[in-house]
Each structure stands twice: as structure tokens, then as C-alpha cells.
């Protein structure tokens, strides 16, 4: 992380003259045995002439754009530009401006202590916080300590399949058309291009007819509309899910985004939140599964209009909701940002550079945890079955997984985010391949107790005379003790 | 057909709306198609009517053409006439892969596994021991450039039992499911209460339009069911939709561009007015199907007049007077059985009948025999009219134990009005005891052999008939007006193999263990007992008894 002091922003109580280095370490404890140490290596320096010129821009956005080519663009690196307290670059009441890339503009805040507290907040927003790490390691965190959001995030995987489904339960009344191909190219593809660093994505879509929700909506007389209350939403998905079709051709998790055009007899349909107010987007999402949006068809001007009605879906409105849900599912919500922060909108890409870093940090940690769990389970299996055969290729996969995970940890401690992430991905691949190797199937091995059972016909008759003579010996010794010497 | 076969219902009348989504093909060999053989197959990721599960499969595994049929029962060609689309008993899968697929065997294995998941069938039992690569019998039915048969795989699982759980996923592939249209009739409890049930899925690339500048994927779902009303209806052969399916038709699938019911009302023996259908059909269609002139009553569910008079359609057919005219015997039919006795050797006999009065035609016979029946190829004899018939083409691939089955393909000329008998002897192999399936005494199935032929038709056909009505545009294009393509399957065979007593190993263990234990026990006793001289006893039983009596009497004992 580079902290760059603009002219007139250097606090008076700096310990050393610029430039200098400083290291801050912090330990995040996950459970009794696991903890993550975060280590920030900070380089303090003053601005160069080019940076000064860039900072002289009229608005923060322009300054951010001008500064971008001057920065270190390695994944996971951050650059903070410290501005004088009175700078007019940031709007009133805003102390921190987080740009589209990997930089932020920060007001000096008077003393070094105040500045450092502020810098810590910024780094946590832009890289990771204790809670985002805890969410990544959610399998290891005791239940009570986890925020409900943490279970929402998708597990780290090498790839994801995104499926958009248009549900038309009433094709007699509505013929629905959607330009999904255009919408995917225009809205989804830029985001996925950016996310392609994290995983492989495939996108497809389908239209399902006569697919109904599992809940009958309630009719509300006041608004003459139909309502789905928040507590009935969990039951909505099940009957639809059977129709969606599993992804038979790949093993990646599927993200489902459903656009539901309600039946003519149930229109308009609105989703209510817990307080009974209608949800403005008319959509909801299901953790680790996807999202559903209800798309109401405008009632025809004349009631005599002949059925079926032709509906052209407004894809911009739909994709806005689906992309917001996609961000939520990847844990890129911006709820934890303090109020004096100003975030630059990521624009068409839907994702800022630092948000990508945020995701990579979390996924790398999660991958490492997954590998350690997988290898531990494998070791437990081997302990349980003594005569299991480990083939050479399985063994080499295990060795490779261990080596990769070690290199991932090393890279991570050096701050090389990209290398660490790649190594952790390789480790996951190798460990899964070792664990799911068909030769390690538990059932292939004959349990020892059954081998014993087969030879019971041998052991039982052989044991009878031995046991009888043992009993006889015991009886005789006891008899001998009672009457010690009966000899003449 | 209703009017034709005394027992059968025209199965093709249940052609599902899913197949209507694309136009019928002009034919594999149409000049337009030939000019555009360089067309690339489209890769799709946005699906409208085509089911996504199958679309993804085709795209992911490089499938060019896929044909899957799940069948319960056997189509009796001799009595029911030429089948519209026959399939062998059990499961049949044949797939053409694209030339870009490098490891066809791996893709084939993966494909059968995924299909077994989609259709809840045991297609995952397809492996190298029941997969063959036919060279002549199966040609691509869609647009194809190059027919390198190494891209083809064919497998039959004759043991597969087809039931409700296979029908449900099949119905789910239809755009309207079983919620609307003709598919509401497909209730499992009726469909499986029948003499023959065959459901199939065919995927192939076809021309998008007549100019054939772009290629589309066609999915064709067919269902063939034979209801036996003669035996279930107290000797009456009248039927109605309600009697067959316990449902009537009320609406169409809103997505269908065509939705029609065809009833075969062809007059027979020049006698007219043998039967009547009600309600009155929307139109009457005449076509030449498989070399025979047929008349169909057509109910077009999309025509508004049909549902005007009554809200539901219940097609009924009544015979005016009891008639017992025999079905005309089809031009080509075949029969197969196992001969021989004992558990060591046997003989597979195939009888192929050509009943055409004056024309001979060739037929391709494909025979797949599992490796555990060791064929003696030198015993192969083909006899027609008492003379040996030499096949003009033979392709034989011997089996390898536990690796691949026998494959025998022959092109045989069938003279007019003849019976051709093909016999080949085999020896039964001994299997390892773990290789027997559950219930081994049931026997081992040998898949049906496949007959493919261009049968000369009695009536001249016009090409345009095919294009006018998609129902009769069979998958197989007819090459010219004088003949039509027929693919027939013979009966699957059930062969007994020498079967061991599977409890024997445990019995042996028990017996030997007991013997060893008894020997051990006596030795042990001999070795560990201490022997000592016994003092003279207190007397015999009589003396003791006397003492007891004396004691009771109060007399001192002896």
C-alpha cells in the first residue's frame, strides 16, 4: 500500500522524514484453532510532479482517472492520496473518495493518529475486513458468531453457470419475448469479463412455459392486486426448481435468475417485505441459489383486447435487478461503508478493481481452507481403512495440493494476490481430484468384521474345547486352593 | 393403424407439439442440402422451445445426431403391419459425433451417463462390451458432411425395463409439458397398460428453411403405443380417445403451430363403409405411407370450428359389422430364435421374409452378439429357397473377451417371394462369478438384430406428399418414388448360460470349517486330557436302585 502525501497535507507529527516504510499487523481470530493475520506494508512518500498535476483536477473523478496510469496496478495493491484537510477536490462532508481502480483520496485529518485510523478504515473497505474473512471461512466459524449475510455468499468455485429463465405460466394469455442475447452482451458480459479472473463463467437462458410458483398469492382488495408475503417466499422456488433442469454437463454451481411473468388471473403481483410494504424492485434473492423477479404485464387499455397479449420485456430494468443480485451473491454489497465515504460507481463494468481484489482475497482464503478440509478428510478416511490402496497418481495429486497450498500461503504473506489465488485454485483442483478418485471409494474395501463373520463356523467350534478346558483349569485351581494339602 | 391393424392405434397421431417447432426436412439428399454441406452446426446458449438440458448436452459433447429410444414390448410386424418407427425392446442409443471430437469413446461414455441421469434409465450400463461401430446400417439422418463411421456409436440394452419414471422426463421436454395440447392424454397408468410402448428422442441438424443457408437443430419426440382392444374390450374393436387414455382433448398447446390427430380409415378389400368415425373430421387426408395408399381422418385442433360444437374432442371409431379381415402381410418382416440344446453350444437362426410378388431387394442385417456367446463364423449359412445365398458385403468384427461384442453386418439380396434363413452357431462361455447379473437364471439377453432395407413399394409414391404433411415425413428420406426405407428390429433373444450355485463358496467355507473344527477339537482333547486309572465303581444301576429303595424302607444299604 502506498500512502502519497500531496502538497500541504503532511501531518506535523510524522516520526521520520518521507519517504519511509511501516508495517502494521493485525490478527483476526476465526475459531479457537484458526486465525488469519493481516499485514499491511505501507510506503509513505510525497507526490511526484505528475501526480501533483493530476490532483489539481477539478473533481475527484477526473483526478482518479488522471492518477490511474501512474499507479501500481498489481492485484491487491492500494494507493492512497492524502489531501489537505481544506481540499476542495472532495465534496463537503466527505472525507474519503474511493475510485474505480485501486486508489482512494483521503483528507489528512489533522494528526497522524487520525490519518492512520482513517487509512485503516479505507484499507478494510478496499481489501478485506474481519467479517469478510469470517464469511469466507464460514464452515469453521461457530454458528452464533456469523452474520446472516455470510451464508448468502457463493462458495468459491472454479466456475459458475449463470442461467436466466423466463417463466411464463400462462402462455394462453401472454406471449412474452425477451431479447436475452442482446441483454447478456450489453449488461452481463462486461461484468463477467472482469470476473473472469475469479472463475470461468458460462451464460445461458431458457423459457419455461406453465411453470408456476409454489404459492398462491393473496388478493388485496385495496390495491386490487395480488401479494406475495415475505414469509411465503421460501416456498415459491421448489416447484420451479424441478423444471429448471440441472446442469448435467458440468459440475459447477448454477446461479439461477428467474423472470416470472404472473398469470393473467394473478396480475399484477407484488412482493411484500416483512413490514407489509411492497418491495420496490419486485424481486428477491435466495442465498447461494439466485434471484427471482416478478415482471408484471401492464393491463391492456381496453378490457376487450384479445388474448394473448404480446409482451416485450424491458431488459434494462430486469438486468439492473439481476446484476445487483449477482453482486449480492458474490458478497460485493456496499453496506459496511462508513457514511463519510464516497464510492465511485464502477460504471458499465459493474465492478471496481478494488472490489475484484476484495473477492480474490476472500476466495483465496476460502480455497486454502477448503483444501485443508479436503486433505484432512482424506487422511481420516485412510486412518479408518488400514488396507486402502493409494495409487501413485492419487499420491502425486496430494503432494501437488500440499505444495500448491504452501505456495499460496507464502504468496499471500508476501502480498502477491494473483499468484496466491492461482496457486490456491490449483490446490483445490488437485485435492478434489485426489479425494474423489474412484479408487478411494469406501465401499470397495471389505470391512474386517465381515471377514471375521465368514470364518465364524471355524472359530466357534474351535473355541468351544479351548473355553471348556479353560473353565476346567479354573475350577481345578479353585478346588486346589480350598483343600491345600490332602496328600499323605 | 386403427382401420388396418385389428389391434393397433395409429401411434404417430400422438406426435408431440415439440417436434413442430421446426420445419420438416427436404431430405438428406436433396440438392439444396448437398450444396451446403459445408455449413457449420450452430451452437446455442439461449433456448426458447428446445429443452436446455439436451441442448447443453449436444453443445458440450460435440453431438451431431442423437437417437434414443426406450421401449417396452415388441412390435409384431407380422400381425400389426409395418411400424411407423420401430425400436428394439429395452433401450437403444445411437449417436453421431462431430469430427471435432477427438476422443469419441470418452464422449460416448459421458453422454450415456448424462442421458441416464436425464431420462432415469440405466444407460450408464453402456460400455465397451455392448457398444459397436456399425459400418453400413446407420447413416446420419440429418444434414451431414462426411460419414466417417468412426464417429458413430451404437448400443442396445435389451434388459432395460421402461416405466413411468422414464416417461415423466420425456414429457418434461415438451414446451407445454403435459399441461396442454395432445400431451394431456399421456397418462402413465394408461400408456403402460398396453401391448407395446416406445418413446424416442431424435436430435439432428436440419436446414432452417428451403434455401438452406442456415442450420437448425431439430428435436423430434415420438411415442408409439399399441392398445389391444380386442382382448380388453370383450371382442369388440371399437375405441375412443376416452377409452384409451381416460381423457379427452380440450385445448391445444398455445405454442404449437400444428396440432393434429390422424385416424387411419383406409378402406380395405375395396369394401367401403366398414367403419365410421365421430365426430366428423375437419378434413380427410390421403397419403402413401410405406408403399401403401392410406386415408386419414384429420382433426386439426387449431381449427376454430372443432371446439365450437362441444368443448372437448373425443374421437371414436366404430366398426359397422364384425369383420375379421386379416392384415395384409408386410413386404418385409423377420423372425429370430435360438436353436440347439444343452448349455454348451447353440445356434442363432434368423428368418427374413420378402413377400413382394415380383421384386427382389437387398437388406442390410446388423447382428450384435455379446462376447460370452462365442460365434463360430465358419458355421454362418444363408439359405434362400434351398440354395446358398452369398452376401455381397460382409463386415465382421470378432469379440474380445470382456472388451467388445461381436459385430456382423451383411448385405443380403432377398429374391421375390422368399424366405431367407441365416444360421450361425455359438458356444457359451463361462463367466467369472462376479460377472453374473442379479437373477442369472433368468438368462442373458442378446439385443435385437437390425434390418435396414429400401423396400420397393407396390403403389407409386410422390415426393411432395412428404412435404405436405409433417406427420408422415419420416426421419428417413425416400430416395425415389418407387421404394421406401424400412428399419426393422427382430426379437431380442434370451440365452441361458451355465450358471453356478452362488451360495457354494460360503457352503464350502462352512463345510471345511466344520470339518477342520471337529478334527481340531478331538486332537485338542487327545492332547490336553489327563488320563488316570479309574477305581472300581460303586456298583451298577441295579445296585443303586436297590439302595434307594432300602433307604426309603429304612433298611441299611447294601
Image (tube, rainbow, N blue to C red):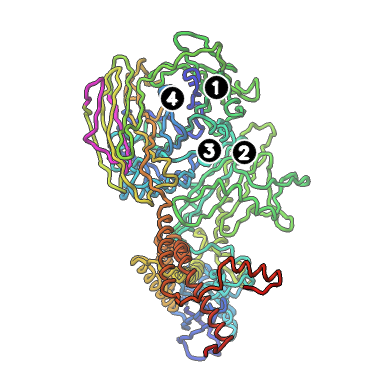
Mark 4 sits on what residue?
B472
**Closer to us: A38 or B267:** B267
The chief SS type of the magenta part is strand
Specify start and end residues of the magenta stretch as a single range.
B362-389
Q: Is residue B523 left or right of residue A307?
A: left
Q: Is residue B45 left or right of residue B102?
A: right
Q: Is mark 2 in CB contact (under 8 Å) with mark 1?
A: no
Residue B92 is drawn in which quadrant?
top left
Mark 1 sits on what residue?
B299
Mark 2 sits on what residue?
A170
Callout 2: residue from which chain? A
Q: Tell which residue pokes out farthest to the top in this image.
A: B271
Instruction: Specify whether disc 3 shares its chain with disc 1.
Output: yes
Judged by depth in the image, the label closer to the viewer, 4 or 2, is 4
Q: Secondary structure at mark 3?
A: helix
Of label 3 and label 1, which has the lower sequence position?
Answer: 3
Which x, y percent locates residue B104? 32, 47
Mark 3 sits on what residue?
B171
Q: Is residue A352 visible?
A: yes
Q: Is mark 2 in CB contact (under 8 Å) with mark 3?
A: no
Amino acid at each position: 500500500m502506498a500512502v502519497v502525501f500531496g502538497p500541504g497535507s503532511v501531518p506535523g507529527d510524522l516520526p521520520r522524514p518521507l519517504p519511509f516504510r511501516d508495517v502494521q499487523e493485525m490478527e483476526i481470530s476465526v475459531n479457537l484453532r484458526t486465525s488469519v493475520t493481516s499485514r499491511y506494508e505501507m510506503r509513505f512518500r510525497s507526490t511526484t510532479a505528475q501526480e501533483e498535476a493530476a490532483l489539481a483536477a477539478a473533481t475527484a473523478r477526473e483526478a482518479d482517472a488522471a492518477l490511474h496510469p501512474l499507479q501500481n496496478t498489481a492485484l491487491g495493491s492500494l494507493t492512497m492520496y492524502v489531501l489537505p484537510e481544506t481540499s476542495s477536490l472532495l465534496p463537503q462532508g466527505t472525507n474519503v473518495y474511493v475510485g474505480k481502480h485501486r486508489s482512494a483520496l483521503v483528507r489528512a485529518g489533522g494528526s497522524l493518529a487520525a490519518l492512520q485510523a482513517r487509512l485503516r478504515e479505507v484499507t478494510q473497505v478496499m481489501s478485506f475486513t474481519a467479517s469478510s474473512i469470517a464469511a469466507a471461512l464460514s464452515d469453521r466459524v461457530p454458528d452464533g458468531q456469523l452474520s446472516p449475510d455470510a451464508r448468502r455468499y457463493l462458495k468459491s468455485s472454479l466456475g459458475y453457470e449463470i442461467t436466466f429463465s423466463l417463466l411464463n405460466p400462462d402462455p394462453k394469455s401472454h406471449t412474452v419475448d425477451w431479447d436475452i442475447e442482446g441483454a447478456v452482451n450489453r449488461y452481463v458480459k462486461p461484468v463477467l469479463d472482469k470476473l473472469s479472473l475469479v472463475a470461468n463463467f458460462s451464460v445461458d437462458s431458457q423459457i419455461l412455459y406453465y411453470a408456476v410458483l409454489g404459492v398462491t398469492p393473496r388478493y388485496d382488495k385495496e390495491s386490487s392486486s395480488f401479494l406475495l408475503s415475505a414469509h411465503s417466499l421460501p416456498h415459491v422456488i421448489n416447484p420451479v426448481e424441478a423444471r429448471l433442469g440441472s446442469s448435467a454437463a458440468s459440475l459447477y454451481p448454477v446461479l439461477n435468475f428467474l423472470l416470472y411473468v404472473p398469470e393473467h388471473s394473478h396480475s399484477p403481483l407484488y412482493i411484500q417485505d416483512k413490514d407489509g410494504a411492497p418491495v420496490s424492485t419486485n424481486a428477491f434473492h435466495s442465498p447461494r441459489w439466485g434471484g427471482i423477479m416478478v415482471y408484471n404485464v401492464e393491463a391492456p387499455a381496453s378490457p376487450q383486447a384479445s388474448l394473448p397479449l404480446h409482451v416485450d420485456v424491458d431488459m434494462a430494468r430486469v438486468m439492473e435487478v439481476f446484476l445487483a443480485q449477482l453482486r449480492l451473491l458474490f458478497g460485493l454489497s456496499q453496506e459496511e461503508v462508513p457514511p463519510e465515504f464516497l464510492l465511485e460507481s464502477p460504471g458499465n463494468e459493474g465492478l471496481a478493481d478494488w472490489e475484484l481484489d476484495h473477492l480474490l482475497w476472500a476466495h483465496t482464503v476460502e480455497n486454502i481452507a477448503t483444501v485443508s478440509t479436503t486433505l484432512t478428510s482424506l487422511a481420516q478416511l485412510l486412518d479408518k481403512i488400514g488396507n486402502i490402496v493409494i495409487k501413485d497418481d492419487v499420491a502425486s495429486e496430494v503432494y501437488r495440493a500440499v505444495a500448491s497450498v504452501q505456495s499460496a500461503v507464502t504468496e499471500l504473506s508476501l502480498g502477491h494476490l494473483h499468484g496466491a489465488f492461482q496457486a490456491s485454485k490449483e490446490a483445490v483442483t488437485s485435492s478434489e481430484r485426489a479425494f474423489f478418485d474412484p479408487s478411494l471409494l469406501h465401499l470397495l474395501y471389505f470391512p474386517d468384521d465381515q471377514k471375521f463373520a465368514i470364518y465364524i463356523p471355524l472359530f466357534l467350534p474351535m473355541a468351544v474345547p479351548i473355553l471348556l478346558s479353560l473353565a476346567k483349569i479354573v475350577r481345578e485351581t479353585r478346588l486346589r486352593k480350598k483343600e491345600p494339602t490332602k496328600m499323605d | 393403424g386403427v382401420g388396418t391393424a385389428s389391434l393397433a392405434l395409429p401411434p404417430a397421431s400422438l406426435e408431440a407439439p415439440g417436434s413442430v417447432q421446426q420445419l420438416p426436412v427436404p431430405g438428406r439428399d436433396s440438392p439444396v442440402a448437398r450444396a451446403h454441406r459445408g455449413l457449420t452446426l450452430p451452437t446455442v446458449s439461449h433456448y426458447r422451445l428446445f429443452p436446455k438440458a439436451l441442448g447443453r448436452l449436444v453443445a458440450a459433447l460435440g453431438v451431431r445426431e442423437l437417437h434414443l429410444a426406450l421401449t417396452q414390448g415388441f412390435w409384431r410386424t407380422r400381425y400389426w403391419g409395418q411400424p411407423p418407427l420401430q425400436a428394439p425392446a429395452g433401450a437403444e442409443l445411437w449417436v453421431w459425433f462431430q469430427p471435432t471430437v477427438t476422443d469419441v469413446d470418452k464422449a460416448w461414455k459421458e453422454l450415456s451417463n448424462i442421458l441416464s441421469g436425464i431420462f432415469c434409465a440405466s444407460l450408464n450400463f453402456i460400455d465397451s462390451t455392448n457398444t459397436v461401430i456399425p459400418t453400413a446400417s446407420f447413416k446420419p439422418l440429418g444434414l451431414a458432411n462426411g460419414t466417417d463411421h468412426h464417429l458413430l456409436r451404437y448400443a442396445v440394452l435389451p434388459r432395460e425395463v421402461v416405466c413411468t419414471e422414464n416417461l415423466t422426463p420425456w414429457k418434461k421436454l415438451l414446451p407445454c409439458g403435459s399441461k396442454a395440447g395432445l400431451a394431456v392424454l399421456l397418462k402413465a397408468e394408461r400408456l403402460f397398460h398396453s401391448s407395446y410402448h416406445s418413446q424416442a428422442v431424435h436430435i439432428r441438424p436440419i436446414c432452417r428453411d428451403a434455401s438452406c443457408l442456415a442450420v437448425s437443430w431439430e428435436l423430434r419426440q415420438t411415442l408409439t403405443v399399441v392398445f389391444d382392444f380386442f382382448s380388453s374390450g370383450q371382442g369388440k374393436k371399437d375405441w375412443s380417445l376416452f377409452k384409451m387414455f381416460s381423457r379427452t382433448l380440450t385445448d391445444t398447446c398455445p405454442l404449437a403451430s400444428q396440432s393434429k390427430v390422424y385416424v387411419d380409415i383406409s378402406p380395405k378389400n375395396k369394401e367401403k363403409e366398414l367403419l365410421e368415425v365421430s365426430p366428423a373430421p375437419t378434413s380427410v387426408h390421403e397419403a402413401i405411407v410405406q408403399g401403401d395408399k392410406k386415408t386419414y381422418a384429420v382433426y386439426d385442433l387449431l381449427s376454430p370450428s372443432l371446439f365450437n360444437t362441444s368443448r372437448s374432442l373425443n374421437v371414436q371409431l366404430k366398426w359397422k359389422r364384425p369383420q375379421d379381415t386379416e392384415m395384409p402381410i408386410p413386404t418385409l418382416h423377420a423372425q429370430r430364435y435360438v436353436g440347439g440344446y444343452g448349455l454348451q453350444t447353440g445356434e442363432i437362426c434368423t428368418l427374413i421374409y420378402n413377400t413382394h410378388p415380383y421384386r427382389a431387394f437387398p437388406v442390410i442385417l446388423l447382428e450384435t452378439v455379446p462376447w460370452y456367446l462365442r460365434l463360430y463364423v465358419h458355421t454362418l449359412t444363408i439359405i434362400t429357397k434351398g440354395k446358398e445365398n452369398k452376401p455381397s458385403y460382409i463386415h465382421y468384427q470378432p469379440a474380445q473377451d470382456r472388451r467388445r461384442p461381436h459385430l456382423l453386418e451383411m448385405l443380403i439380396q432377398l429374391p421375390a417371394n422368399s424366405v431367407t434363413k441365416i444360421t450361425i452357431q455359438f458356444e457359451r462361455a463361462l463367466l467369472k462369478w462376479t460377472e453374473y447379473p442379479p437373477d442369472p437364471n433368468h438368462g442373458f439377453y442378446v439385443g435385437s438384430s437390425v434390418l435396414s432395407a429400401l423396400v420397393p413399394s407396390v403403389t407409386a409414391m410422390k415426393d411432395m406428399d412428404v412435404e405436405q404433411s409433417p406427420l408422415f415425413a419420416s426421419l428417413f428420406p425416400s430416395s425415389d418414388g418407387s421404394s421406401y426405407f424400412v428399419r426393422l428390429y427382430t426379437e431380442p433373444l434370451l440365452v441361458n448360460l451355465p450358471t453356478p450355485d452362488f451360495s457354494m463358496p460360503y457352503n464350502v467355507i462352512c463345510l471345511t470349517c466344520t470339518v477342520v473344527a471337529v478334527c481340531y477339537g478331538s486332537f485338542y482333547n487327545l492332547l490336553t486330557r489327563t488320563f488316570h486309572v479309574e477305581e472300581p465303581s460303586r456298583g451298577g444301576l441295579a445296585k443303586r436302585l436297590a439302595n434307594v429303595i432300602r433307604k426309603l424302607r429304612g433298611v441299611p444299604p447294601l
